[in-house]
């Protein structure tokens, strides 16, 4: 199983970097500050001059069905590769351990589960299966009871494997371009991620409330 | 893995490892999912079913600032997150969804995503009390609906 890693300055810097990088804070920054932004570094495809002097991306325009779907999906692949490359680096530097350190004392007040579930919570953000396995262990070791397990499950079940799943497909949504080449989605990627996290906590508390209300009867 | 072996890795190698994961995901997951979604949307479009679904769900989806067709994204998501994203991008491609709609849908795709799969992989594996399955499904869908309302404020 996973062991707890030491959390140093680097871990916190990696976490701060990740937040800034995906926040879109420097998306429109002039000059070198742009290197701190995901969409800036993700770049763009070159254009091909087509009929009537109009410029097209390699996918062209007017396609349909499976063939168009294939070429379109191909345009999403570099974004996913880049996003997961960056996520892998910040994870390696310990950003998630830093997040665990910050979250652990909050688990009891915000979710009603013990701080010892912190590692499982972070693992669940990366992989649904890792979270499931570790939650089972927490119950077997007597760290959480049946109700706490259900509350924890409510947190994990909605947007399971949040970070991995979001950056492996959702990131692509945020680099789609309009016909004029401008970015279609102007909301920074970090906002939906934050909303998901808030709703996961909210959902767990609905479960908490439900269990409390039904146990009184 | 111990700390010593971890520190020997070059950052560039770690990046490449992640990018390779991205490539595998792209080839094994995104391309097949998006291709399928494009074909399904194409079929729904040719048969006129998409317009019908759009009309049917228009009053409900309007609450979230979305066109009726966006309901197909949520249905797709419930079965698989990748499928939901695929449906979303193909509707964007058809001009039925714009960037604002995609931003509203983004958290919802995940919050109620892949629930059938995860019932087994998460709730089953962790031995969650089976009496609670129903409410867990309901909470996830509720989360998704509220998230769309919140996103509406941000976009």
Image (spheres, coloured by chain):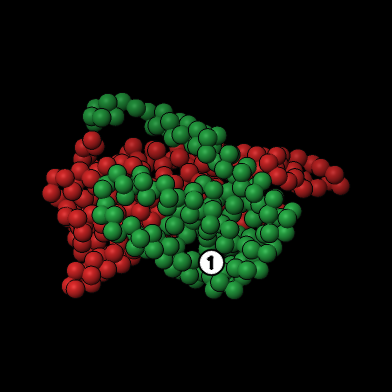
Chain colours: A red, B green
Residue A190, position as x, y percentages in the image:
44, 56
Mark 1, Cα crowd under 10 Å, few <14 / some 14-19 / many 20+, is some
Q: Quadrant of the N terminus of chain A?
A: top left
Q: Is residue A187 left or right of residue B14?
A: right
A201 up-or-down from A81: above or below: below
Query: Residue sitting at 52 percent across and 39 percent down?
Result: B29
Q: Quadrant of the C terminus of chain A?
A: bottom left
Look at the image and tell me whether residue B34 can be seen: yes
Task: Specify the farthest residue to the left.
Answer: A142
B23 up-or-down from A108: above or below: above
Q: Which residue is mark 1?
A: B155
Query: Residue sitting at 54 percent across and 48 percent down?
Result: B83
Residue A71, position as x, y percentages in the image:
67, 39
Closer-to-camera residue (A126/B84): B84
Query: Residue sitting at 29 percent across and 64 percent down?
Result: A207
Look at the image and tell me whether residue A31 can be seen: no
Residue B95, position as x, y percentages in the image:
69, 58
Report which quarter residue A97 is drawn in.
top left
A171 up-or-down from B139: above or below: above
Q: Is residue B102 left or right of residue A59?
A: left
């Amino acid at each position: 199983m996973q062991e707890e890693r030491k959390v140093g300055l680097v871990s916190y810097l990696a976490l701060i970097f990740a937040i800034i990088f995906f926040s879109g804070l420097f998306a429109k920054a002039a000059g070198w500050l742009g290197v701190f932004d995901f969409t800036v570094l993700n770049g763009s495809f070159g254009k091909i001059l087509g009929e009537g002097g109009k410029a097209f991306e390699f996918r062209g325009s007017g396609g349909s069905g499976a063939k168009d779907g294939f070429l379109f999906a191909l345009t999403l692949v570099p974004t996913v590769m880049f996003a997961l490359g960056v996520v892998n680096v910040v994870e390696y530097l310990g950003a998630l351990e830093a997040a665990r350190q910050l979250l652990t004392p909050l688990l009891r007040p915000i979710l009603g589960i013990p701080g010892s579930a912190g590692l499982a919570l972070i693992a669940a953000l990366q992989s649904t299966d890792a979270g499931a396995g570790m939650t089972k262990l927490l119950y077997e070791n007597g760290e959480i009871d049946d109700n706490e397990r259900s509350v924890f499950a409510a947190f994990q079940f909605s947007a399971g494997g949040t970070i991995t799943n979001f950056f492996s497909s959702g990131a692509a949504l945020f680099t789609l371009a309009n016909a004029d080449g401008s970015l279609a989605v102007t909301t920074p990627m970090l906002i939906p991620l934050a909303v998901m996290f808030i709703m996961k906590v909210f959902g767990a508390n609905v479960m908490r409330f439900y269990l409390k209300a039904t146990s009184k009867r | 893995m111990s700390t010593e072996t971890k520190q020997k890795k070059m950052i560039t190698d770690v990046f490449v490892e992640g990018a390779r994961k991205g490539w595998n995901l792209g080839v094994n997951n995104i391309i097949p999912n998006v291709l399928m979604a494009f074909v399904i949307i194409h079929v729904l479009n040719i048969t006129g079913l998409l317009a019908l679904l759009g009309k049917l769900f228009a009053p409900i989806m309007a609450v979230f600032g979305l066109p009726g067709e966006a309901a197909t994204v949520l249905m797709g998501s419930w079965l698989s997150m990748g499928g939901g994203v695929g449906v979303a991008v193909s509707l964007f491609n058809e001009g039925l969804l714009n960037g604002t709609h995609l931003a509203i849908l983004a958290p919802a795709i995940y919050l109620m995503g892949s629930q059938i799969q995860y019932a087994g992989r998460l709730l089953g594996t962790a031995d969650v009390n089976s009496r609670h399955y129903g409410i867990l499904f309901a909470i996830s869908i509720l989360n998704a609906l509220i998230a769309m309302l919140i996103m509406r404020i941000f976009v």
